[in-house]
Image: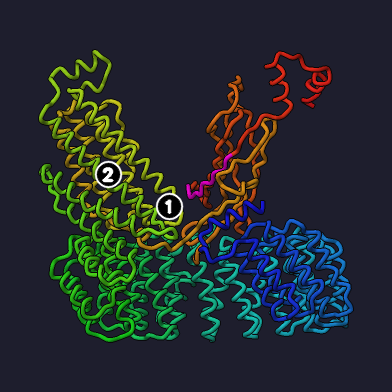
């Protein structure tokens, strides 16, 4: 196991100067055994970094045992350092293998005469509660220490009691009465009672325990009406209800009652805070009466701070199922219009409030109601929402304070949501944004540009007439000297790229380049070029990449920019394609392929071991193969036109039973079939690229999916028009256009897909069988239509926002990776697979790992000895297990048979399953070798048989009993 951890760490890519696991642990152990207190403390506090770098149990177990020794014999300051390390490394505690030994060393300090040492030990035990929830000696020590006369020890016991109550049902049930007596006892000081009450939030392990805790809290709320006691008790009440779930409606009513009747602002604020917590966690438990009561309180309160809090709760609820429950007519009552509800009146009243926060929540409620309620009389409500949003936009865009910017973000988010649900409002919203953009502060302009780009990506609402205003503003910003200038140039350029749906005019390109030359740094120019590549403006992108080539210091960056320049040039070549001009189409594709091959060479040179650019290389290689397949298809179609099949080809096909005879000559048959298989193979490879891109954003994945669909479409068209017209079905392809379109690129691709499908289907209906001239023309036009849509290089091609990787360690593992592990053929090998999930700075941004799927397979590489007739089941090992990582660690075992003598190659491959149940082939793949040896007894018997000697009596007995 130590060797496996070591081999894993050697592969981790931390650099040669880094120590391996054992050396790093020995270095820290030397510090722990130092006679100087400072060196000991320094060694202790470096342990969390060690755990982070080498997160496997073999090292963590050794390290924690060393820390336990320091805790046992050290002074209180060292113990405090060990406690902090344990609390920081909580997720690694379950990897401790010798839990008993670890606890024994720590627990010995509980018998110290020093109350501070006992207090630190109690906190240490509390921090370890997740791995020792049912240790009775720990439970007893906590109960005993609650009666201590030393305040430090009692507070530590309270901390430990809270942690153990959360983990152990038995401890919670046993300590509940003790806590109850202490809280109700007259001898207990009030400040201690305030610390004891929060323990009751963990009494949710069963219904009776939760019920008794609620009764106690109910008594406390009425018996101790002081502000501090009410606040602590109510909050504990809420947390208990949120965990036990059954009492949430009662808790909402209780909090609303305090909000309405209690005159103290601190209690009202606490009630609002807890209502917000319950609104986020369980919005479905809010009844119409609850929302109505909150609306009435908000309408009648004279305090802006309280009104802001209540509106915050209501705006949270307005985005959930609770809003539909509120507007659904109660049984037995006549249906009322939406505008007559108190919630709508409150939102309309608050839209123009002088407090920005209140106004923001007001328009957010109106937006959510407009988006979720499909009523007939919503037009006035939509207008109210738009007017409210416009007034807030005017107010916040002139102010660059943090509060105004936060409000502006809410306003712009609401605008995007409203336009998405109500497209007919887009024109007025966009016009108000463009008008306000001229006079806004720079910080606000950046946010407004993001909003404009988001709206324009969904709906083509930015007409060419608006480009003039945007260009004037771009020139104005280029001449300004503000600190937000660089960011603003990028944001505004993005809006210009999105708004100019066709190719950029030379005028616009000149203006952008002039401003970049005068006012920007290289990074700004690169970001604008990147946005141009994403929006399909490859001509502009190529010029910008070209200008940046000489401005980078690193060889890898030069090759990266050079590859992007070549890819942009290749895509630019494809924009001049014309329908029905197939010879020029072939020359354009050939020119594009030439640039792509140059680009892929540069891209390969730009990759490094730490940044292998695997997605980028995979995507570009597929693009090259797709262009080659398109070129081959056009050539085949031209060939089919020049040598069409004879008139009796259909009769020959029916007579011979070979449908490929329809195509005429053997070469045409083979080429068409080969083309169809090539496109299907490309679609499969795009699917593999999709499955390997776990960290990609949804737009990138959708882009890959569109490429895959274009391959399937062409293969389907070949089959439907030429190879097998009778059996081709249109059903599975007809629903592609119904999905919600997220970008202009997707919109244009879906339009081409639908057009090609309609053409193919109409040809099949009108002219059966279809003439080869019409078939070839249709296929060539489909290829040209697909290539004329400028390719979009999405975010993941340039930027990785989420990073997830898995590291595996196998046990047993050889010291040298090339050496095989020796196993006797009559025994099974227990292969232990351990793994750690490693994340970047934003774990779970797009998707989270639910479980890890481990696939183990073995292949016989070389035989040794004679061939025996062995059942097929014993020849191979194919196993799969799914394990759920806990605290980013997982472990499982496989039993493998190696009956055949020789060297076997074992491959362990991991893939992940996300929270939606989708499998992603993320890797890694690890390989070890096993040498299966003949067991000594079988070898002896075989040798004796070869020499012609009968086995002795003793050996015969052994044969009879060896199976047992």
The x and y percentages for residue 937 are: 74, 26
Examine the rendered structure and indicate whether residue 441 appears above or below residue 611: below
The x and y percentages for residue 920 are: 48, 48
Find numbered disc 2 in the image and state the secondary structure of the residue it sits on: helix
Label 1 belongs to which residue? Answer: 693
Looking at the picture, tell me which residue is in the foreground, 753 or 620. 620
State the residue at coordinates (77%, 68%).
Answer: 68
Q: Which mark is residue 676?
A: none
The x and y percentages for residue 588 are: 15, 49
Mark pair 1, 2: CA separation? 20 Å
Examine the rendered structure and indicate whether residue 508 appears above or below residue 473: above
Q: Which region is colored magenta?
A: 921-929
State the residue at coordinates (69%, 78%).
Answer: 39
Q: Residue furthest front?
A: 947
> Which quadrant would the C terminus be assigned to in this image?
top right
How many C-alpha atoms fall within 10 Å of the one at disc 1: few (<14), some, or many (≥20)? some
Dot 1 or dot 2, earlier in sequence: 2
Label 2 belongs to which residue? Answer: 626
Taking the image as shown, residue 595 lies to the left or right of residue 692, namely left
State the residue at coordinates (58%, 24%).
Answer: 872
Find numbered disc 1 in the image and state the secondary structure of the residue it sits on: loop
Taking the image as shown, residue 571 lies to the left or right of residue 128, namely left
> Is 883 within the magenta?
no
Looking at the picture, tell me which residue is in the foreground, 957 or 487. 957
Looking at the picture, tell me which residue is in the foreground, 292 or 686. 686
> Is 924 within the magenta?
yes
* Residue 116 visible here: yes
Q: Quadrant of residue 456?
A: bottom left
Taking the image as shown, residue 141 lies to the left or right of residue 623, namely right
State the residue at coordinates (27%, 25%).
Answer: 726
């Amino acid at each position: 196991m130590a060797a496996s951890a070591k081999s894993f760490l050697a592969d981790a890519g931390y650099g040669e100067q880094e120590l391996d696991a054992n050396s790093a642990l020995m270095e820290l152990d030397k510090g722990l055994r130092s006679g100087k207190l400072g060196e000991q403390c320094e060694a202790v506090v470096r342990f969390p970094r060690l755990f982070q770098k080498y997160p496997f149990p073999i090292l963590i177990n050794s390290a924690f045992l060393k820390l336990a020794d320091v805790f046992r014999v050290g002074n209180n300051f060292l113990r405090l350092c060990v406690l902090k390390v344990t609390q920081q490394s909580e997720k690694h505690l379950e990897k401790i293998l010798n839990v008993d030994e670890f606890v024994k060393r720590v627990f010995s300090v509980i018998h110290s005469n020093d109350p501070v040492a006992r207090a630190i030990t109690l906190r240490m035990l509390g921090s370890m509660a997740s791995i020792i929830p049912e240790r009775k000696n720990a439970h007893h020590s906590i109960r005993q220490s609650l009666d201590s006369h030393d305040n430090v020890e009692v507070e530590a016991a309270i901390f430990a009691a809270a942690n153990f109550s959360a983990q152990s049902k038995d401890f919670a049930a046993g300590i509940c009465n003790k806590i109850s007596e202490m809280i109700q006892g007259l001898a207990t000081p009030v400040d201690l009672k305030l610390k004891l009450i929060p323990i009751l939030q963990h009494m949710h392990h069963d219904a009776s325990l939760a019920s008794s805790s609620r009764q106690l809290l109910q008594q406390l709320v009425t018996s101790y009406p002081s502000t501090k006691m009410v606040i602590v008790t109510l909050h504990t009440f809420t947390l208990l209800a949120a965990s036990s779930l059954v009492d949430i409606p009662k808790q909402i009513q209780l909090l609303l009652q305090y909000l309405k009747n209690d005159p103290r602002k601190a209690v009202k604020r606490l009630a609002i805070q807890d209502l917000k917590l319950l609104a986020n966690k369980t919005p479905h438990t809010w009844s119409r009466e609850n929302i109505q009561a909150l609306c009435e309180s908000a309408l009648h309160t004279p305090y802006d701070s309280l009104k802001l809090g209540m509106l915050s709760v209501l705006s949270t609820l307005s985005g959930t199922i609770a809003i539909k429950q509120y507007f659904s007519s109660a049984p037995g009552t006549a249906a009322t219009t939406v505008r007559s509800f108190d919630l709508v009146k409150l939102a309309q009243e608050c839209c123009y409030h002088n407090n920005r926060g209140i106004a923001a929540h007001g328009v957010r409620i109106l937006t959510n109601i407009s988006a979720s309620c499909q009523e007939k009389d919503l037009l006035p409500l939509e207008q109210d929402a738009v007017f409210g949003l416009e007034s807030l936009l005017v107010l916040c865009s002139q102010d660059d304070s943090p509060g105004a910017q936060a409000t502006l973000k809410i306003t712009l988010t609401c605008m995007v949501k409203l336009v998405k649900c109500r497209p007919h409002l887009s024109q007025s919203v966009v016009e108000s944004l463009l008008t306000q953009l001229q006079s806004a502060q720079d910080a606000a302009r950046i946010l407004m540009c993001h909003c404009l780009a988001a709206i324009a990506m969904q709906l083509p609402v930015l007409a060419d007439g608006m480009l003039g205003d945007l260009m004037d503003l771009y020139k104005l910003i280029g001449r300004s000297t503000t600190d937000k200038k660089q960011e603003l140039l990028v944001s505004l350029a993005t809006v210009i790229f999105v708004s100019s749906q066709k190719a950029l005019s030379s005028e616009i390109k000149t203006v952008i380049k002039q401003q970049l030359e005068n006012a920007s740094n290289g990074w700004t120019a690169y970001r604008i070029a990147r946005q141009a590549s994403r929006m399909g403006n490859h001509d502009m992108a190529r010029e910008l990449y070209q200008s940046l080539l000489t401005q980078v210091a690193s060889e890898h960056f030069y090759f990266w920019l050079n590859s992007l320049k070549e890819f942009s040039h290749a895509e630019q070549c494809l924009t001049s394609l014309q329908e029905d001009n197939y010879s020029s189409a072939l020359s354009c594709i050939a020119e594009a392929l030439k640039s792509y091959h140059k680009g892929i060479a540069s891209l390969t040179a730009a990759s490094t071991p730490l940044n292998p650019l695997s997605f980028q290389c995979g995507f570009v290689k597929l693009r090259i193969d797709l262009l080659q397949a398109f070129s081959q298809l056009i050539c085949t179609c031209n060939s089919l036109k020049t040598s069409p099949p004879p008139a009796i080809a259909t009769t020959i096909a029916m007579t011979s039973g070979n449908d490929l005879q329809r195509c005429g000559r053997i070469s045409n048959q083979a080429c068409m079939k080969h083309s169809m298989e090539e496109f299907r193979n490309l679609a499969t490879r795009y699917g593999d690229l999709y499955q390997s891109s776990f960290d990609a954003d949804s737009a990138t994945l959708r882009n890959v999916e569109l490429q895959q669909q274009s391959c399937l479409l062409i293969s389907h068209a070949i089959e439907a028009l030429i190879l097998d017209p009778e059996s081709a079905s249109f059903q599975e392809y007809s629903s592609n256009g119904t999905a919600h379109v997220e970008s202009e690129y997707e919109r244009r691709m879906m339009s081409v897909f639908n057009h090609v499908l309609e053409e193919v289907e109409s040809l099949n209906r009108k002219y059966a069988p279809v003439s080869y001239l019409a078939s070839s023309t249709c296929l060539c036009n489909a290829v040209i239509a697909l290539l004329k849509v400028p390719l979009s290089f999405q975010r993941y091609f340039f930027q990785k926002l989420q990073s997830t990787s898995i590291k595996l360690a196998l046990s047993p593992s050889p010291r040298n990776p090339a050496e095989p592990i020796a196993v006797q053929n009559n025994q099974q090998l227990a292969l232990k697979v351990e793994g750690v999930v490693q994340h970047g700075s934003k774990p779970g941004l797009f998707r989270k790992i639910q479980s890890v799927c481990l696939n183990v397979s073995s292949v016989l590489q070389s035989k040794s000895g004679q061939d025996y007739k062995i059942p097929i089941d014993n020849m191979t090992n194919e196993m799969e297990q799914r394990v759920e990582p806990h605290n980013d660690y997982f472990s499982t075992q496989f039993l493998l048979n190696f009956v055949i003598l020789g060297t076997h190659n074992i491959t362990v491959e991991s893939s992940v399953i996300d929270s939606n149940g989708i499998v992603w082939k993320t890797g890694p793949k690890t390989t070890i070798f096993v040498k299966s040896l003949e067991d000594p007894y079988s070898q002896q018997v075989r040798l004796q048989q070869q020499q012609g000697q009968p086995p002795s009596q003793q050996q015969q007995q052994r044969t009879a009993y060896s199976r047992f």
